[in-house]
Image: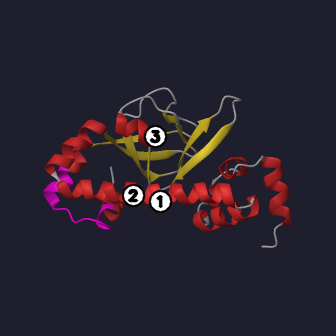
C-alpha cells in the first residue's frame, strides 16, 4: 500500500505526526476493483468510505424506469461512498462502481469513529471535505435547474478537463441529464 496520495490529501488541511499516520494506516484496507465491479450496491450498506489511489469510480442512482443518473465521479485523490448510507449506517440509495480498474483505500465507519477520538484533527479534515462536497453538490443542483445542457457541459469540461477522456460519453451524458444521442449532437454543434 502506497499512502503518499492520502498523505498529500490530508496535508492540505491538517498536520499529522508519524505515530498518527501509522495509526491511520493500521485502520485502512487496500482493495482492488475490476472495471465494472461494485464498491456499494443500492439497497446494501456503505460500510466504508473509499479513497481512490488509482483509477476512477462513479456513484449513480437508478430510477423507477431503470435509468441511471450519475451523481459523482471520483479519481485519484478523491473520496467516494454513498455518504448518507455511510454516515447513518443505513441502506444505500446509490450504486458505487469502478469505471476503470481501480485501487482504493477503505476506511470503515467504526474505524473512522475510533480515529476521530484518537486524532481530533482528522475530524476537522473530514468536516472540511464534507463541507466542500456539500458546496459542490449545491453548485451541481443550481447548474441542473438553471443552465442549458451546453452550459452544464462547459462547466463539466472545466471541472473534469484532465479526466474527461477517461469517462465514456454515455456516462457524461447521464451526468449532464441528457441522452447520449443529444449529447453527441450538442458536442458537434459546440464551437470549441
| Of labels 3 and 1, the one closer to you | 1
Left or right? Give the position of 162 relative to 132.
Answer: right
Mark 2: secondary structure: helix
Q: Position of residue 134 (x, y in %)?
A: 45, 55
| Residue at the spot of label 2 | 131
Q: Position of residue 35 (x, y in %)?
A: 57, 40
Q: In which image quadrant can residue 148 be found?
A: bottom right
| Image quadrant in which the C terminus is located | bottom right
Mark 3: secondary structure: loop
Marking on residue 117: none
Q: Is residue 169 magenta?
A: no
Write the residue at 40% across / 45% down. 50
Marking on residue 82: 3
> Nearer the N terminus, badge 2 or badge 3?
3
- CB under 8 Å between discs 1 and 2: yes
> Nearer the N terminus, badge 3 or badge 1?
3
Judge whether 34 appears above or below 75 on screen.
above
- Over which residues does the magenta segment extend? 10-23
Left or right? Give the position of 60 relative to 25.
Answer: right
Write the residue at 42% across / 60% down. 132
Amino acid at each position: 500500500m502506497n499512502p503518499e496520495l492520502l498523505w498529500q490529501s490530508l496535508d492540505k488541511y491538517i498536520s499529522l505526526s508519524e505515530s498518527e499516520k501509522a495509526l491511520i494506516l493500521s485502520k485502512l484496507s487496500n482493495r482492488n476493483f475490476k472495471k465494472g465491479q461494485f464498491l456499494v450496491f443500492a439497497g446494501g450498506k456503505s460500510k466504508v468510505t473509499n479513497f481512490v489511489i488509482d483509477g476512477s469510480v462513479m456513484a449513480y442512482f437508478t430510477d423507477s424506469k431503470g435509468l441511471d443518473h450519475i451523481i459523482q465521479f471520483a479519481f485519484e485523490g478523491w473520496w467516494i461512498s454513498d455518504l448518507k448510507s455511510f454516515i447513518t449506517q443505513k441502506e444505500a440509495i446509490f450504486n458505487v462502481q469502478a469505471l476503470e480498474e481501480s485501487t482504493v483505500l477503505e476506511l470503515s465507519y467504526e474505524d473512522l469513529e475510533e480515529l476521530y477520538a484518537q486524532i481530533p484533527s482528522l475530524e476537522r479534515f473530514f468536516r472540511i471535505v464534507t463541507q466542500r462536497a456539500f458546496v459542490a453538490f449545491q453548485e451541481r443542483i443550481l447548474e441542473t435547474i438553471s443552465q442549458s445542457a451546453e452550459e452544464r457541459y462547459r462547466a463539466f469540461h472545466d471541472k473534469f478537463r484532465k479526466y474527461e477522456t477517461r469517462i465514456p460519453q454515455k456516462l457524461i451524458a447521464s451526468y449532464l441529464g441528457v441522452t447520449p444521442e443529444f449529447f453527441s449532437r450538442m458536442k458537434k454543434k459546440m464551437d470549441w
